[in-house]
Image (cartoon, coloured by chain):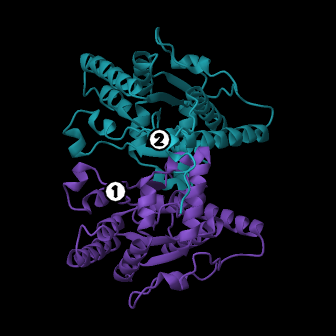
Chain colours: A purple, B cyan
Amino acid sequence: MPDTKKYRVPTKGRVKLADYDPAATPFAHDSIKAQEKDLKALNQQLARLARPLQAEGKRSILLVLQGMDASGKDGTVRGVFKYTSPLGVRLVTFKAPSKEELAHDYLWRCHAMVPAKGEIGVWNRSHYEDVLVPVVNQWIGRDTTRQRYAQINDFERLLTENGTTVLKCMLHISKDEQRKRLQERIDTPEKRWKFSLGDLDVRKQWDDYQQAYEDLLEATSTAHAPWYIIPADDKLHRNLMVSTLLNHTLLDMQPTYPVDYPELAGLQVV
Amino acid sequence: MPDTKKYRVPTKGRVKLADYDPAATPFAHDSIKAQEKDLKALNQQLARLARPLQAEGKRSILLVLQGMDASGKDGTVRGVFKYTSPLGVRLVTFKAPSKEELAHDYLWRCHAMVPAKGEIGVWNRSHYEDVLVPVVNQWIGRDTTRQRYAQINDFERLLTENGTTVLKCMLHISKDEQRKRLQERIDTPEKRWKFSLGDLDVRKQWDDYQQAYEDLLEATSTAHAPWYIIPADDKLHRNLMVSTLLNHTLLDMQPTYPVDYPELAGLQVV
């Protein structure tokens, strides 16, 4: 499998999104067909590896998907977990917080939804929205933001120290690609439900969001919970990269079926 | 698609599980290959229909899977939702209740997990465990059991009146098929984790459980939330039947993408 390290955000030093081409396709083959074949093989391996992870019931994976509107978070879930049964994967989609959620600290609703042992948890948006929306809209200041980065790092360390591998992907699209995709949502009847007029207001804050992303990537890409920047203008290639990362993660974990049950030796069911 | 009505438990009259052959394969074709092809087509249609259901965001489906140990509840989830992305399906596996759950009425934990609008919720075990385990073990008497049937019917009516289609499948296996499958779990290293010594104690209560199933099927197969008895000795055929039922349900609901957004007419993203 190709090398993903280049897209891992370093734990030190400034992050410039401009250094990452959203249209890059570093894992690409000559043909679309070959890429599709690769993706299928990766997704099927993922489904295979999810089963001993569940059987073990000791460790879990948390895949965080973040990105601007129309960056392909839903599409990634659909494209990567095509062969994984609902038995091993649990998707959580975080929306704007409810009144009850706002009445608690911002990590409260997230902590409640972390994957159980044996599960692959996938978060479509996450606690990172709380260092994006309030930052861009200046509801919180620099000090609070820095405090949140530290709280997030602590939270993710807690998870990793208790058996959860945390993998974070920022789906990186260009401003023009977003324009095309939003326009497509407006123009295609079956996609209209995914569009909201508010998306255009957020699009006007594009530069501020990119800045907020750079800041959070820099502050929260840790050795225990690294960020990956996924070039996401090409949907097939985006799926290929995320699936590769997940496969790497699972292969590293080497989940194995627990087979040592001495009490079952020679047991006959009558 | 074949007729499923024969397997729908009537809302009146006595139910005898002996009248339903667990090894029956009424939807079967000449060849395994043809059945596999059918199942694939059904599962893909299911995945297609789940998307407008989600887009609509107004209605939901609750599929309840019940059955003896090794009757194939997990296998059905794996076999039927092979092409459905985690975006549209939410699986809940109910285990023995925790102390906190026992400190509430038995429907409390179930109500908390009902599918949201747009979702297909799948329950691996359910509130029906609470008219099985305590009945067989005589922790509750006849009056309480009857009260629970009525409470369950009320609960399910609440759900259906608020947009949830409730579909309940009892995976019906023979005692000998269970013996084979439990033995297989013991003998196959990769399946051992699914076996628990307690399964043998429950197996000793086979007849009592069959009786409790007959009683609950009779009391809770309602016009608003019918039970289906799924012959489940043949795994492929079981999946074919459950997928057929789900497809019927979705085709009846006719989910359609909402396309009428006058505010988007002629809108250009800049």
Q: Residue at x 32, y 26 (%)?
A: B135
The outermost residue toward the bottom is A13
Judge by depth and name the residue closer to the eye, B209 or B13.
Answer: B13
* Host chain of mark 2: B
Label 2: which secondary element: loop
- Badge 2 local density, few (<14 within 10 Å), some, or many (20+)? many
**Residue A1: image x %, image y %?**
64, 78
Judge by depth and name the residue closer to the eye, B157 or B118.
Answer: B118
Q: Mark on residue B119?
A: 2
Please tell me in which quadrant of the rendered image residue A212 appears: bottom left
Q: Which residue is mark 1?
A: A113
Please tell me in which quadrant of the rendered image residue B220 appears: top left
Q: Residue at x 41, y 44 (%)?
A: B92
Q: Residue at x 25, y 25 (%)?
A: B140
The outermost residue toward the top is B13
Q: Is residue B167 above or below residue A193?
A: above
Query: In this image, A216 relative to B49: left or right?
Result: left
The kind of residue on which mark 2 rests is Glu
The answer to the question of whether label 1 and label 2 lie on touching residues, with beta carbons closer than 8 A, is: no
**Residue A270: image x %, image y %?**
50, 38
Q: Residue at x 45, y 57 (%)?
A: A199
The kind of residue on which mark 1 rests is Met
Judge by depth and name the residue closer to the eye, A52 or B180.
Answer: A52
Quarter in which the N terminus of chain B is drawn = top right
Residue B79 makes an appearance in the image: no
